[in-house]
Image (tube, grey):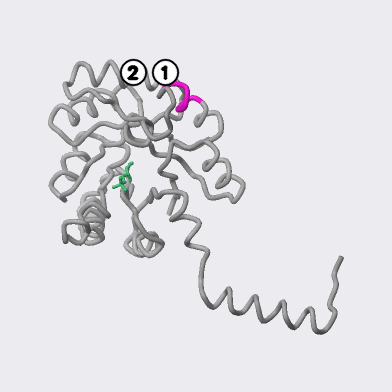
């Protein structure tokens, strides 16, 4: 499973690149707003750091303006994935932009029907939001499993990009189901390394090493 980082914070992206944990980046208008930076500038800086797909989202809701914005975003770098919302205009924009050879990430997916439409529109990525479904007591992981089954039934090449990931547990569950990609905030990706028995075991090893006077360098 590929790991994308869901942030527009360049320092956080650099940190995770050093750990070898960045296969791509996703942003959205809320994350860009949180960065306090100009969208074009921050996306360009991210694309300079990351070789994999970098999702940048349109803010228009009509087909024509989505196309215009998408083309401006795609000019930033060859690894831009234009993010469009899962609306009829968004699907139409997806079809046009992918036919021009651009990567498109269809976002705000909350149902298997929506995911089926995105695949028919030729989306490069579909972004089902796991955490936001969990928030309203609908099993977000079950949606990932449903989409996996549907895409496998027909050999759709659209990649399942599990989004709105809120916990380390979500990451391993998405990997078990067979999501192609999961995008998560930096803190969630780092939390995957934590285990209480690792901390306990390390403390015991360090105590024993000190008692025995073990020195390596
Ligand atoms: C996905 O592309 C979105 O940017 C993101 O995962 C949304 O997550 P949230 O529900 O935690 O805001």
The numbered mark at residue 150 is: none
Q: Is mark 1 within 8 Å of ligand 1?
A: no
Q: Residue at x 54, y 78 (%)?
A: 197
Query: Main structural element of the magenta stretch: helix, strand or loop?
Result: helix
Q: Residue at x 55, y 39 (%)?
A: 11
**53 w.r.t. 194: above or below:** above
Quadrant of res 206: bottom right
Please say if the residues under marks 2 and 1 sit with CB atoms less than 8 Å apart.
Answer: yes
Count of residue discs: 2
Q: Residue 15 vs residue 55: left or right?
A: right
Quadrant of res 122: top left
Pick the quarter of the image with the C terminus.
Answer: bottom right
Figure quarter occupied by ligand 1: top left
The numbered mark at residue 75 is: 1
Which segment did they paint magenta?
A: 40-44
Real-space Cα separation, disc 2 to disc 1, in angstroms:
6 Å
- The residue pinned by badge 2 equals 71
Q: Residue at x 39, y 48 (%)?
A: 183
């Amino acid at each position: 499973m590929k790991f994308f980082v869901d942030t527009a914070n360049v320092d956080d992206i650099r940190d995770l690149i050093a750990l070898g944990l960045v296969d791509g980046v996703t942003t959205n208008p809320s994350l860009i707003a949180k960065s306090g930076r100009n969208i074009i500038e921050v996306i360009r800086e991210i694309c300079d750091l990351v070789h994999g797909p970098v999702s940048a989202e349109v803010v228009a809701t009509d087909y024509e303006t989505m196309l215009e914005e998408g083309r401006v975003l795609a000019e930033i770098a060859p690894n831009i994935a234009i993010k469009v919302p899962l609306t009829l205009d968004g699907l139409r924009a997806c079809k046009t932009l992918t036919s021009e050879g651009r990567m498109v990430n269809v976002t705000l997916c909350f149902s298997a029907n929506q995911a089926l439409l995105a695949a028919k529109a030729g989306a490069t990525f579909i972004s089902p939001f796991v955490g936001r479904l969990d928030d309203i007591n609908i099993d977000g992981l079950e949606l990932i499993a449903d989409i996996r089954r549907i895409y496998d039934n027909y050999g759709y090449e659209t990649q399942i990009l599990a989004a709105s990931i809120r916990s380390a547990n979500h990451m391993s569950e998405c990997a078990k189901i067979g999501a192609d990609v999961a995008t998560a905030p930096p803190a969630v990706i780092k939390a995957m390394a934590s285990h209480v028995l690792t901390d306990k075991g390390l403390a015991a090893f360090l105590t024993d090493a000190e008692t025995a006077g073990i020195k390596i360098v």
